[in-house]
Image (cartoon, rainbow, N blue to C red):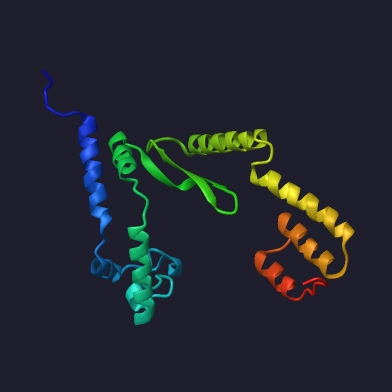
Amino acid sequence: MPDRPYTDDDLRHEAARQHRASLDDPDFMGIGEQMDGSRIESTVTDPGAPVTTVAGGRTWDMLARDDFDAAQRSIDDLLTGAADTSEWAINLGADGLVPSTEHEITLNAGRPLARIHFAFEPDMPEDMRTGLVEGIGDAINEAGVEREGDSDGDVFDLISEIASRLRDATDSGEYHAVGLIYDLANGRTTIAEARAELAEITFRHV
């Protein structure tokens, strides 16, 4: 007969259920209360400086009322729409692993398709962490090449080739527009700059 009528997995499952329940319905007014006195991260240049100084940044309650209310609503939306990672959180803590805020791999194709987060044993050396992440990243890149064009790099290479050929076959506004595509594909311009140039182009058939 077991020493206790439940397993470690049962404990983790119940802890995850309660963790999930605590996040299901965030208290809107409580969100605002917790924002009071909390710093706006992007305004802080010296975390050790007092809030009353420029380097210490601003707190949410220093905002104008309308700005504060808009931020509170946005935070409520983020909390309500947060992905359910309760089971992961409980298991990571139980296994003694610490999530990393510096290591992440995101696969994009115009939008995020997948994201890999990492958690490490607290005493793992930094070079081992970096090597593990880079190794996984290299494996993903190699798999992308094997899929014959699914990787972002291959897609942009093809866009660049098409744009180059079109540019040689067109003139005037069309030439300029295709040149923008070519520059975007090769990182030679920004989206904002390309939009501004596009607004100045006249097309013959539009």
Q: Nearer the viewer, residue 161 or 100?
A: 161
Residue 117 x, y percent position in the rendering: 45, 43
Which quadrant holds residue 58? bottom left
Task: Determine the residue located farthest toward the top in the rendered image.
Answer: 1
Left or right of 7, for residue 67: right
Q: Nearer the viewer, residue 129 or 67?
A: 67
Q: Residue at left 28%, top 36%?
A: 94
Q: Quadrant of the N terminus?
A: top left
Residue 151 x, y percent position in the rendering: 64, 42
Q: Residue at left 73%, top 71%?
A: 198
Q: How many marks?
A: 0
Relative to 16, residue 172 above or below: below
Which quadrant holds residue 184? bottom right
Relative to 92, residue 182 above or below: below
Q: Residue at left 87%, top 62%?
A: 170
Q: Nearer the viewer, residue 59 or 80?
A: 80
Residue 92 x, y percent position in the rendering: 33, 39
Q: Residue at left 65%, top 46%?
A: 152
Q: Is residue 78 visible?
A: yes
Q: Quadrant of the C terminus?
A: bottom right
Relative to 19, residue 193 above or below: below
